[in-house]
Image (cartoon, rainbow, N blue to C red):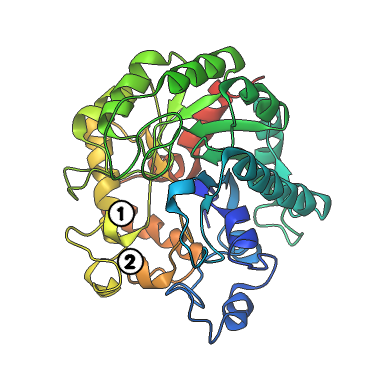
Amino acid sequence: MRLIFDGHLDLAWNALSWDRDLTLDLDLLNLAEAGMTDHPARGRATTSLPELLKGGIAACQATLLARSRPQARKPEGSPRMSLDFVNADVTSAIARGQLAYYFLLERRGLLKMIRTAADLDAHWKAWEAAAGEATPAPPIGYILAMEGADPIVEPEQAGAWWNLGLRSVNLVHYGENRYAAGTGTDGPLTSDGVRLLKEFEKLGMILDATHLSDTSFFQALATYSGPVLASHHNCRSLVPDQRQLTDDQIRLLLERDAVIGVALDAWMLAPGWVRGKTSRDVVRLEALADHIDHITQLAGKPTNVAIGSDLDGGFGTEQVPAGLDRISDLQKLDGILSGRGYDSAAIDAIFHGNWLRFFRRTLPA
């Protein structure tokens, strides 16, 4: 079993908004949701902390995820798993609650926050030493990330979040927010978005280009001189949709030595996929390898592509490739990539080495 670094997991959102006990065995977690009908993903989760351990997922970027969207509120109220909150103050407080959840899991010895490159090296060495041993695995390491910068109430608050451990931020999720235009729309950064990027430069915050609209994407990379990644993105040339990266965007990221994490959401892997209608059987895990291949071909070598699974990012097994029923099934990529001619060193790079190299370079010493 190869060790994995997953570039994007919404763990706290699953716990607090979906009311999931992530400390449970995955089958027990899904059994607890039997009979729930509020969302198609109920009872179809792929991810829990024990399942991460089974899958050799030694580290991840774990997100804070909450949006300030007062216009999205409905008279009948919002479903429990909603992302949207009435204003920036409430949104920021929700994200603080998600962070408190991570801190509680740390106190139980289940997670370990990685703030520095030295933290990362020590954590990875502990996992390598434990590999193959009959001893309990170390805690799962996490780099704190923010999906959509809505919880940052104003640009000058970025430093307070940095002090809490935040190291990676994408400016916007779906739609528009105070800072940028995101998936499903197009438009430039706002003046506050430009100010926020200047704060990020002062701090050394990593910019995650994921979910930026095309106009905001190019403006952000032209404005921001610091480190950039794309935590969970696939290729538009293979699956046409604005959510995906064009080849020009990928090349620009490669020029910045960014790492791109490929994602498991089926609609990002199968052209024409329709949520709630298309069967998962039309796409298999090999489709993820197609996107790995494409990024590798553009880069000329497998140095800038990795895994950013986004598993249980608002969907479950109904919306992932056939053959992947739990996050530990990511290990199946080993044989798929080997069958396409990737050698062991290249597969290790995709599974974890590329993220390690990136964060060793971009986290504070």
Counting from the top left corner in percent of width and height, residue 274 is at 23, 66
Q: Is residue 67 left or right of residue 290?
A: right
Do the numbered discs 1 and 2 sit on residues whose CB atoms are within 8 Å? yes
User: Regarding mark 2 in the picture, which secondary structure is present there?
Assistant: loop
Where on the picture, by quarter, is residue 277?
bottom left
Counting from the top left corner in percent of width and height, residue 221 is at 36, 20
On screen, residue 122 above or below 188: below
User: Regarding mark 1 in the picture, which secondary structure is present there?
Assistant: helix
Any part of residue 36 in sight? yes
Residue at image point 17% right, 57% down = 271
Q: Nearer the viewer, residue 296 or 359?
A: 359
Residue at image mark 1: 288
Residue at image point 55% right, 29% down = 359
Where on the picture, by quarter, is residue 260?
top left
How many numbered callouts? 2
Residue 321: assigned label: 2
